[in-house]
Amino acid sequence: MASLASLDMSQNDLSMLGAAQVATMLPSHLQRLRAGDQWLGDDGVNELCLRWLQGAAASLVELDLRHCTTAWGCARVCQALSALRDPAIVTLTLRGNHLDDSQSRAGAGG
């Protein structure tokens, strides 16, 4: 996977455990990760953050987590990305998840 720049895992019925396993194998130079239309839930999205986003996602320019049945996990993604020293992220798709105002403010840092 040394030259892998884009990975589309959407619509694969990936669970929280699957997300954790995949996250440990993702290369640090990955630019696009599409993991939308899954049943990841908050725990699965949190596993992605803990195991990969906080570790080596500085080159990520596109992250698609649409329709992953997550609520607080979206705020966790925003927190993890904002903690990166020099994030390259350009596109973050969270459409179709269960956000409310408090989670949106937490993800935006306010």
Image (spheres, grey):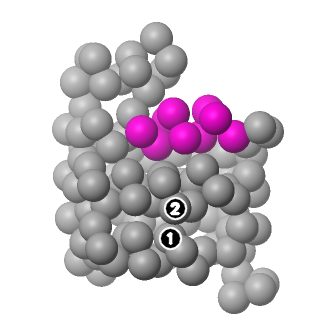
Residue contact between numbered discs 2 and 1, judged by CB atoms under 8 Å:
yes
Q: Which mark is residue 51?
A: 2
Q: CA distance from mark 2 to mark 1?
A: 6 Å
44 and 50: which is toward the camera: 50
Q: Quadrant of residue 21?
A: bottom left
Query: Which element carries disc 2, helix, strand or loop?
Result: helix
**Relative horizontal placement of residue 58, taking residue 99 as reference (left or right):** right
In the image, which residues are magenta? Answer: 76-84
**Relative horizontal placement of residue 91, taking residue 42 as reference (left or right):** right
**Relative horizontal placement of residue 40, taking residue 5 as reference (left or right):** left
Residue hosting label 1 = 23
Q: Residue at x 50, y 35 (%)?
A: 78
Q: Amino acid at mark 2?
A: Arg
The quarter of the image holding the N terminus is bottom right
**Relative horizontal placement of residue 63, taking residue 44 as reference (left or right):** right
Q: Amino acid at mark 1?
A: Ala
| 88 in magenta | no
Report the number of numbered marks: 2
Q: Residue at x 25, y 32 (%)?
A: 99
94 and 53: which is toward the camera: 53
Is residue 91 visible to the viewer in this orientation of the structure? yes
x, y percent for residue 48: 45, 59
x, y percent for residue 67: 26, 54
The mark that comes first in sequence, 2 or 1, is 1
Q: Which mark is residue 108?
A: none
Q: Examine the residues drawn in magenta and state their main secondary structure.
A: helix
Q: Residue at x 64, y 56 (%)?
A: 55
